[in-house]
Image: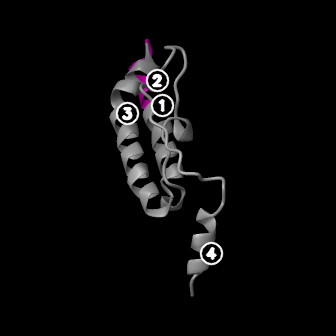
Amino acid sequence: KHLLTEEDYKGFYNCHAFDGLVVKCSCLNPAGWIVIIGDACHAVQPATGEGINSGLEDASILGQCVAEHPDDPFAAYDRLHRADAHALQLLALQARDKVV
């Protein structure tokens, strides 16, 4: 009926791979010539499953920025997506407080 038991879920949080660290990047194009996407720019609480969804959205938005702002797509990505990355950080902090 269920893939995992309550004990399985509790055991996941006993794993030292997730120690509660949540990142918040001040910008998503820190050097101008580089852009931070996916798990590098936002940490989500692992059990929410938002990591892959957010990473795919990042890639889609970056592709849009490359097409629409070829002169400086990374700055455009930062302008369009930094608030979302910061919102994910807040959600991760709230979720972390429930399990750590």
Which residue matches tag 2?
66
Identify the mark at residue 51; answer none if there is no mark: none
Q: Percent position (x, y) of residue 66? A: 46, 23
Please rate how many residues cluster around mark 4, counting C-alpha atoms within 10 Å: few if below 14, some from 14 to 19, many from 20: few
The residue depicted at 49 percent of the width and 54 percent of the height is: 45
Identify the mark at residue 63; answer none if there is no mark: 1
**Is residue 64 positioned above or below 9 on the image?**
above
**Is residue 14 positioned above or below 41 on the image?**
below
Amino acid marked by disc 1: Gly
Relative to residue 15, is residue 75 drawn left or right?
left
Which region is colored magenta? 64-71
Cα separation between marks 4 and 2: 42 Å
Please rate how many residues cluster around mark 2, counting C-alpha atoms within 10 Å: few if below 14, some from 14 to 19, many from 20: some
- The residue lying toward the viewer, choosing from 75 and 8, is 8
The residue depicted at 58 percent of the width and 71 percent of the height is: 10
Mark closer to the chain start, 1 or 3: 1
Amino acid marked by disc 2: Val
Mark closer to the chain start, 2 or 3: 2
Q: Is residue 7 visible?
A: yes
Identify the mark at residue 8; answer none if there is no mark: 4
